Image (spheres, rainbow, N blue to C red):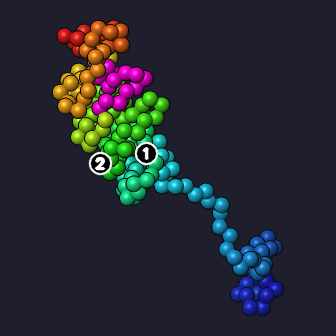
């Protein structure tokens, strides 16, 4: 039986000494007036979006990118992160929600979104990047995006670059210089790029 007269268990009793001890501890010991909350580590929206991209959580990516779109002075490089991880659908969502030129032209370790799609040959994302104003003249390790497209035999992207009025052709891109697009394409066995 509970020794506190105002408690229902003072009349009803408890089945064991252990149950009585638990009841007294939970119900009648003085507890602090201030509630104790677990220690929760806070994260910024940007950190949460990076984590959502890593796990390819499209629902979280959509919600967080929508929220971040209203902050022009935010961190950049989310589209590139999704492309590097091979999360194509995440990249498409991010392009739709936060695909502004400063996001598209973000460079990290000689890599940018346009460089990445020219390496892997994703024509749909290439078209979206160009449409949204990505810089087609960005260099990666001193190589043009045309060189990367030819080197990896992505001929439709190479043709689109050559047809793009914003693309500035350097003298070595179509030359027989050892780093030219044609030489690299033939070196890697992509004869169809040379023809």
The quarter of the displayed image where residue 81 is located: top left
Q: Position of residue 108 (x, y in %)?
A: 46, 35
Quick check: is 142 in the magenta stretch?
Answer: yes
Residue drawn where x is 73% and y is 84% of the image: 9
Quick check: 136 left or right of 1?
A: left
Q: Position of residue 66 (x, y in %)?
A: 36, 56
The kind of secondary structure element at disc 2 is helix
Residue nearer the viewer, 22 or 183: 183
Tell me how many marks there are: 2
Q: Which residue is mark 2?
A: 96
Range of magenta residues: 136-149
Residue 187 visible within the image: yes
The kind of secondary structure element at disc 1 is loop
Quick check: 30 left or right of 75?
A: right
Residue nearer the viewer, 56 or 8: 56
Q: Which residue is mark 1?
A: 76
Q: CA distance from mark 1 to mark 2?
A: 15 Å
């Amino acid at each position: 039986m509970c020794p506190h007269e105002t408690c229902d268990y003072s009349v009803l009793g408890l089945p064991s000494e252990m149950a009585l001890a638990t009841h007294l501890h939970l119900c009648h010991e003085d507890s602090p007036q201030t509630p104790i909350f677990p220690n929760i580590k806070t994260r910024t929206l940007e950190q949460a979006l990076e984590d959502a991209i890593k796990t390819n959580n499209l629902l979280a990516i959509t919600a967080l990118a929508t929220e971040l779109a209203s902050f022009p002075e935010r961190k950049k490089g989310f589209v590139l992160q999704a492309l590097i991880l091979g999360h194509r659908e995440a990249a498409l969502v991010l392009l739709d929600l936060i695909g502004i030129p400063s996001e598209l032209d973000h460079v990290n370790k000689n890599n940018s979104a346009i460089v990445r799609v020219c390496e892997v040959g994703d024509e749909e994302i290439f078209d979206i990047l160009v449409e949204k104003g990505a810089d087609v003249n960005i260099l990666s390790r001193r190589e043009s995006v045309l060189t990367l497209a030819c080197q990896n035999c992505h001929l439709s992207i190479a043709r689109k670059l050559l047809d793009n009025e914003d693309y500035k052709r350097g003298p070595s891109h179509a030359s027989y210089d050892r780093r030219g697009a044609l030489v690299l394409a033939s070196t890697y066995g992509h004869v169809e790029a040379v023809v």
